[in-house]
Amino acid sequence: MRTVVLPGSNLEEFLARLAVGHELIVPQKSGASISFAAYDPSSEVVVEYQRTLLPPKKFFLPPEEALFDFAPGEGFRQKPTSSERRILFGLHPCDIHGLRRLDQVFLEGYVDTYYQAQRDRTLIIGLSCLPDEMCFCNSMGTDLVTDHFDLFLTDLGDNYLVEIGSTEGNDLILDNEDLFAETSDILLRKYKVFLATRSNLFEQKLDTSGLSNILALEWDSSHWEETAKDCLACGRCSMTCPTCYCFTIFDEVNLDGASGSRCRRWTSCLYKNYALVAGGHNFRPSRGARLRQRIMHKHKDSVERHGISACVGCGRCQAHCAAGINFCQVLTSLRGESSESIVG
Amino acid sequence: MNQSLAKVQNPYQPSRAKIVDIRDLTPDTRLFQVMLIDPKEREQFTYRPGQFCQISVMGTGEIPISISSSPTRPGLLEFCIRKVGRSTSSLHRLVPTDEIGIRGPYGNGFPVEYMQGKDVLIIAGGVGLAPVRSLLYYILDNRDQFNQVTLLYGARSLQDVLFPAELQTLEQHRDLNILVTLDRGDTSVWPYRVGLVTELFSEIEVAKNTVAAVCVPPVAYKFVTKELLAKKVAGEDIFMSLERKMHCGIGKCGCCAVGSKYCCQDGPVFSYWDALNLPDMI
Ligand SMILES: Cc1cc2nc3c(=O)[nH]c(=O)nc-3n(C[C@H](O)[C@H](O)[C@H](O)COP(=O)(O)OP(=O)(O)OC[C@H]3O[C@@H](n4cnc5c(N)ncnc54)[C@H](O)[C@@H]3O)c2cc1C
Ligand code: FES
């Protein structure tokens, strides 16, 4: 992969230039948390942060979005999608892996044209990070990225090592050549030191070996209902998850009572009515069954369906759980239970 | 950046369709005959028995409904719709010439090719007759491709029997075996049987090479499959059309997930073997 160097002191100027001709989204302070928001010259770009409250999926699958306008006699008219060029700056490897997972869902099989339009107009500039006590991306194998970005910046002190992932990314460098320098051997060595140092910083660990097999065997475990006693079924883990994509479709009617829009909105498999069908049959009536569904989907079903776990180890679910559920702990104790039952 | 090469069609776009006729089947169920308005779309619309469509009523939403007509009888599409909630009620308020939206067909449908040369045992309960009616007519129109064909159908009461006239006519077909039972009622009037659909198994012989197609209420699958297994039908020859909450119908919204499968795409027809593999399927 072609690499260049961006002196740290040039980052501000680089972003300011990117904002010309692009809609630029950067991590910024928002109350007590960090969130991806539109850049303006006065915005304070946060380059050192652990995780934003909402993952970048909100730019590709908005929390709520209108798909069509409808009116009697006119049918359903597709809402126009923006084609303005957009740059998302500051995505961590876990979030880039999250987008990869969403791509598998939305671009394979039937192509979700709304998601595709957002994806097509967006460049991704990744940014390295250091873990806090909730991060476990290195357990999930998502602490590094080799594709699905246009540029990736690794913070090596005074300089960023910039990996170039696409021709569009390369164009951004060429257009701003004066801000970049050639890579040096010293920087490459620093990069390796950075990787080694970072991998020692992870406190949260998850043993993923055979995890999907173990989960399949622990379907009937009492652990699910036990853990679910704490769960509030609020769906916060889903909303903040970079790979949770479930949505419902519904119609919103205008004041005339006839025209309106067809919309979609995020939902969560933890919600009580998620698997409720007409006639009153609920396929997952208990909270334990719903919690199990969420965990199974991440660590087992996705592996079976897409060959890869849907968990990217960003730690949002456990950092934001209102009941303080630590998903790594839940999985670790399930593993414990299975090894005990084999021994005993 | 993820530059896609070709612009693809919006898969959520409903096609405009006109209601041609509506027939009352039971107090809560109506048969809608529907025609796609665009002649080209009409021509291109092909489907398999057991597939479904997403049906839209503007302003109320979109719901999955099985195609109840058979692809062997092209022309109008038929949907048999039971009024149970918001969207189905607004469908019931429509009249002929009203417009609805349709997209599909979706799902896998019944494996009709696999059923060829075998006995076909169809088991339906309630509105579950809708998708298997498509299969039934498909078989009738290709009768020589199939062996013995039997339909076991259970309804709540006499007035809940869908297509009673059709069933009575078909019952007289010598090459079709049709048994209907009611949850409650009077045994002196047709169909002369009271009891659950599972009780009909005592009246039939099941040959070795039988393939079963089942569409019953969610709670009934366990009981029906038990009977079938007892009659030595192989697990992989039991095909069940399952219901789940569906919003997109195309494997995107996640709502219909059963383990690693999506009911809307990998189903709605699953084999009993799938059910053994995926613990919350039936
Ligand atoms: C593959 C498939 C085929 C079906 N075929 C038929 C058929 O041929 N005839 C028939 O009468 N019914 C059929 N159903 C059931 C039918 O889809 C539901 O009865 C209908 O969705 C209820 O909608 P409602 O708005 O009237 O009910 P409400 O209870 O008011 O439901 C509100 C919303 O919940 C959702 N919802 C509720 N129940 C279901 C459900 N079972 N499946 C999916 N979404 C649901 C819908 O989005 C609906 O808009 C089928 C279901 C599936 C999954
Ligand atoms: S209905 Fe949306 S994934 Fe199946």
Image: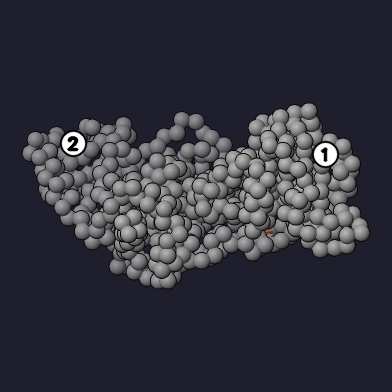
Task: Confirm whether circles 2 and 1 share one chain.
Answer: no
Callout 2 amino acid: Val
Residue drawn 51% across the image and 38% down it? A109
Question: In the rendered image, which quarter is residue A45 located in?
Answer: bottom left
Residue drawn 72% across the image and 38% down it? B207
Its colouring scheme is one colour
**A227 above or below A80?**
below
Residue drawn 28% across the image and 35% down it? A165
Rendered location of residue B31, percent (x, y): 80, 49
Callout 1 amino acid: Leu
Q: Is residue A191 visible?
A: yes
Residue, disc 1: B176
Q: Nearer the viewer, residue A139 or B181?
A: B181
Is the residue under label 1 in contact with that under label 2 (CB below 8 Å)?
no
Q: Is residue A54 left or right of residue B264?
A: left
Mark 1 CB within 8 Å of ligand 1? no
Q: Nearer the viewer, mark 2 or mark 1?
A: 1
Rendered location of residue B160, percent (x, y): 81, 58
Q: Residues within 10 Å of mark 2 (few under 14, many from 20)?
A: some
Element on which disc 1 rests: loop
Residue drawn 56% across the image and 44% down it? B273
> Quarter holding the C terminus of chain A?
bottom left
- Which circle marks residue A4 in the picture? 2
Q: Is residue A95 left or right of residue A285?
A: left
Q: Residues within 10 Å of mark 1 (few under 14, many from 20)?
A: some
Mark 2 belongs to which subunit?
A
> Quarter holding the N terminus of chain A?
top left
Q: Nearer the viewer, residue A160 or B110?
A: B110
Mark 1 belongs to which subunit?
B
